[in-house]
Image: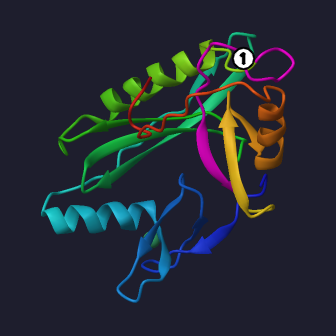
Amino acid sequence: MADESMDECVVCGKRVSTSWRGSVHRADDDGKYRCVCLACANAEVAAKLEISYTPPTLADVTLHDRDGVAHTFMFVERLSPGGKSVVGFERGEAEGYQAQALSEDYEANAVSLQHAAVRKLARSLSRRELEHDGQLPLDAPVRGRISWDRDNAAPAIIIGGRLITWERFGEMFATYEGFHFILEMYDHSDER
Ligand SMILES: [Zn+2]
């Protein structure tokens, strides 16, 4: 999972990361998913909505977590039928911390959205989701993100910027055999 897989954009031919930071997977009429680079995907949405679009240049931001460890983030802008969003991804990590700020207004300022994403990232970095020994806490919520572990062809869970395999996640639950729990999903542009 550490190595990012690359694919060719079906529109411009550029080789891009197939992860969410480099491309989108578009379902075409034949039902097959194809890789489209972010620039082409944004241009397609802009053309459909008949709006003019210039991709912004967003500077990297470095934040420190509660242990003083530095995390550097890159930011990309994405246009979708739901609006404009800026997503921050951790550099040097295939997964890591991530945050998205969304506006329904296509005229929204990209730097303002980036600031909103940075505030979310800072809040994530200030929290300790798991106990020191890596176990799930008792009587406290745990926030995470659902991803896909290609190596094991199984879901992967990202908690506190760390990838936890599905198998390991199961072991973490086994510690609490007999306990009850609440599980709640929410959209990645929301924050709880
Ligand atoms: Zn392209």
Q: Relative to 16, does residue 52 appear above or below in the rendering?
A: above
Residue 19 position in % (x across, y down): 59, 58
**In this orientation, which residue lies closer to the viewer: 35 or 178?**
178
Say which element carries label 1.
loop
Residue most extreme to the left: 50
Residue at 42% from the left image edge and 26% from the top image edge = 191
Q: Is residue 95 visible?
A: no
Badge 1 is on which residue?
137
Q: In which quarter of the image is the N terminus?
A: bottom right
Q: Is residue 107 magenta?
A: no
Q: Quadrant of residue 182?
A: top right
Residue 64 position in % (x across, y down): 66, 16
Colour approach in the figure: rainbow
> Is 57 positioned to the left or the right of 142 in the image?
left
Q: What stretch is highlighted in magenta?
A: 131-149
Q: Quadrant of ligand 1?
A: bottom left
